[in-house]
Image (tube, grey):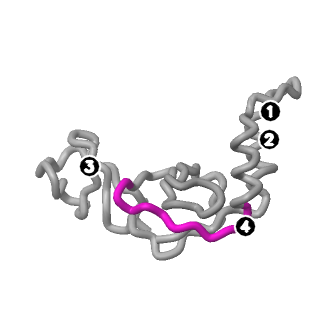
Amino acid sequence: MKIVVRRNALELYINQHTDTQGHYTGKDNWEIIMKQIAGKELEVDTESLFKYEFNTKEIIGVSKRGIRISDLYVEQILDDARIGKARCDYCEHTSNALQYCTHCGRTDCLEPFLEEE
């Protein structure tokens, strides 16, 4: 699974972290990261999946441990590993099924990653 980061990720980050009076509350290190990854294709760590965020694998020259990036900064998702999977709110694992949690067996605590089309 991979994501393509928006080319204007830095601009989006700055706008998101500037209040209505023009006070900037963002972090300098995140500005540097956003500038470096803008427009890039990044590999996603599929061990921990989320609905609105992505954990990346190592990004050479940027982060050895990867980063967590909001879907607001993502232009495209390639080979989405979340299809047919859900997050279990009870055991907090990723379920490989939508009808029941493949870890704890519960049927009433699943939040699908993607809405059915």
Ranked by sequence position, the earlier of labels 1 and 3 is 1
Ranked by sequence position, the earlier of labels 4 and 3 is 4
Query: The residue tagged with tag 1: helix, strand or loop?
Result: loop
Query: The residue tagged with tag 3: helix, strand or loop?
Result: loop
**Left or right: where 81 falls relative to 60:** left
Q: Which residue is mark 3?
A: 93
Q: Is residue 101 above or below residue 85?
A: above
Kindly report the distance in space between the C-alpha atoms of the residues bearing marks 1 and 3: 35 Å
Q: Residue at x 13, y 48 (%)?
A: 104
Q: Which residue is mark 2?
A: 15
Q: Which residue is mark 1?
A: 18
Q: Amino acid at mark 4?
A: Gly
Q: Image quadrant for the C terminus?
A: bottom left
Find out whether the residues at labels 4 and 2 contact each other: C-beta distance under 8 Å.
Answer: no
Question: How far across and down, in percent of the image, does residue 13 sit?
Answer: 74, 45
Find out whether the residues at labels 4 and 3 contact each other: C-beta distance under 8 Å.
Answer: no
